[in-house]
Image (spheres, rainbow, N blue to C red):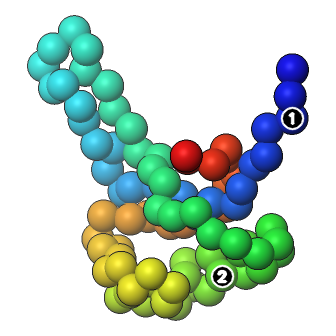
Amino acid sequence: MYNKKLYPVICYITRKPVVYNEGTKWEKTCNRFLWCYTYGTQEEVEARIQKMNKEKPAFDDHSKRPINWDEIDHFFYSEQEEMY
């Protein structure tokens, strides 16, 4: 067994769950999604997230991606393994 390195990520929860395979036996819903991988300490990333949730900017300061607050309820801190 090896130690897996975890990286800080920003995730978000949607106001309404997204439905996949609607009307089939494989139908599932999900409301938690990855926004981006990020760098910094947990405290730094959580401060960034708190600022985003409080100020509700139209764009993410770091990636310049638009944020649709009609669909996104809030952002939260998480960790996961490197994607590649």
**Residue 80 visible in the shown view:** yes
Q: Residues within 10 Å of mark 1 (few under 14, many from 20)?
A: few
Identify the residue at image location x=58%, y=63%: 37
Observer-nearest of 34 and 24: 34
Task: Decide if residue 9 is on the left or right side of residue 56.
Answer: right
Q: CA distance from mark 1 to mark 2?
A: 28 Å
Quadrant assignment for the N terminus: top right
Residue found farthest to the left: 23
* Circle count: 2
Residue 17, picture quadrant: top left
Please name the amino acid that badge 2 sits on: Arg
Identify the residue at image location x=86%, y=28%: 2
User: Element under label 1?
Assistant: loop
Which residue corresponds to mark 2?
A: 48
Whether residue 75 is situated above or below residue 68 in the rendered picture: above
Q: Mark 1 or 2 closer to N-term?
A: 1
Identify the residue at image location x=55%, y=78%: 53
Observer-nearest of 79 and 18: 79
Please name the amino acid that badge 1 sits on: Asn
Whether residue 1 is situated above or below residue 48 in the rendered picture: above
Whether residue 53 is situated above or below residue 59 in the rendered picture: above
User: Element under label 2?
Assistant: helix
Residue 73 in percent (x, y) is at: 44, 64
Identify the residue at image location x=30%, y=64%: 71
Which residue corresponds to mark 1?
A: 3
Q: Nearer the viewer, mark 1 or mark 2?
A: 1
